[in-house]
Image (cartoon, helix red, strand yellow):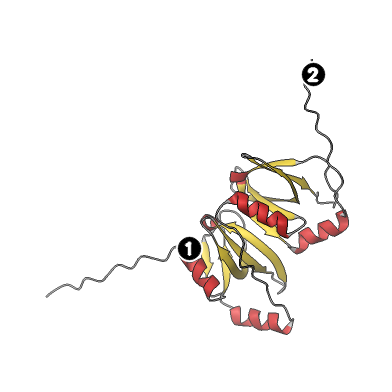
Amino acid sequence: MTARILPFRARKTMRARLLQAREQRMLVRIWRGELEYGSFCGYVAGVGREFFLLRVIGDGLTDDGLYAMRHRDITELEAPEAHGAFVEKALAIKHIVPYLPTAFPLDAVNDVVVAASRRTPVMGVHVDNEEESEFCYIGRLVGRSVEGFQLQEINPDGHWLDEPSPFAWDEVSTLSMDDPYARSLLVVAGHAPPLKQQDDTCGS
């Protein structure tokens, strides 16, 4: 009896699945189990070499802004989202039409940071700590260099800080834009004050 040899079909890479979801405007759900509890629901707006862009739909069926995330952090991808038909019907009833940008650079983190700063007055910078969980800092881009960039932050009480906070490019896991929390902080904080002048002189 001759054995049948079945052709091996390589499992689709995460990037390929994201590209398919974008092309089909498919509502997806994403988990990043190593970084946080819970999941993100939304539409894939773009896919680059390192990052992808997700228009997030919140649990209250609201438009919660854009998130640029790294492919490698995804631990599970549900495409299409299990309750997608209900979510899309609810969005239609509420007259919410998620806008998906078509030209957003996603190949390298420095390009993502600059593009985010041009798109929104304040952005969320999510960074990994040593325990591999995420912390988020909200503010506006005020400088960049080869090693990283600087953010003028708004603290959780809605006050601008007067000194820049430094971030290394390689510690950034996510950039968020236009999310409701950041918008609320900006409303309370108002216009950013001038940064405190740094004293570069050395004491004798």
Identify the amino acid type marked 2. Gly
Q: In this orientation, which residue lies closer to the viewer: 105 or 185?
A: 105
CB within 8 Å, label 1 to label 2: no
Q: Quadrant of the C terminus?
A: top right
Select label 1 or label 2 by which is in front: 2
Q: Is residue 72 in view from this perspective?
A: yes
The residue shown at (61%, 52%) is 111
Q: Residues within 10 Å of mark 2 (few under 14, many from 20)?
A: few
Q: In this orientation, which residue lies closer to the viewer: 162 or 110?
A: 110
Q: Is residue 79 in view from this perspective?
A: no
**Rendered location of residue 64, percent (x, y):** 71, 67
Residue 81 image-quadrant placement: bottom right
Query: Of all residues shown, which one is farthest toward the left?
Result: 1
The residue shown at (62%, 63%) is 38
Identify the amino acid type marked 1. Met
- Say which residue label 1 marks: 14
Q: Is residue 141 above or below residue 62?
A: above
Query: In the rendered view, does 184 fall on the left or right side of 95?
Result: right
Q: Is residue 172 above or below residue 2?
A: above
**Rendered location of residue 199, percent (x, y):** 81, 29
Q: Residues within 10 Å of mark 1 (few under 14, many from 20)?
A: some
- Say which residue label 2 marks: 203
Residue 69 image-quadrant placement: bottom right
Q: Is residue 201 above or below residue 11?
A: above
The residue shown at (44%, 63%) is 13
Q: How many marks?
A: 2
Residue 176 image-quadrant placement: bottom right
Q: In this orientation, which residue lies closer to the viewer: 192 or 13?
A: 192
**Rendered location of residue 100, percent (x, y):** 64, 70
Q: In this orientation, which residue lies closer to the viewer: 4 or 124?
A: 124
Q: Earlier in the sequence, mark 1 or mark 2?
A: 1
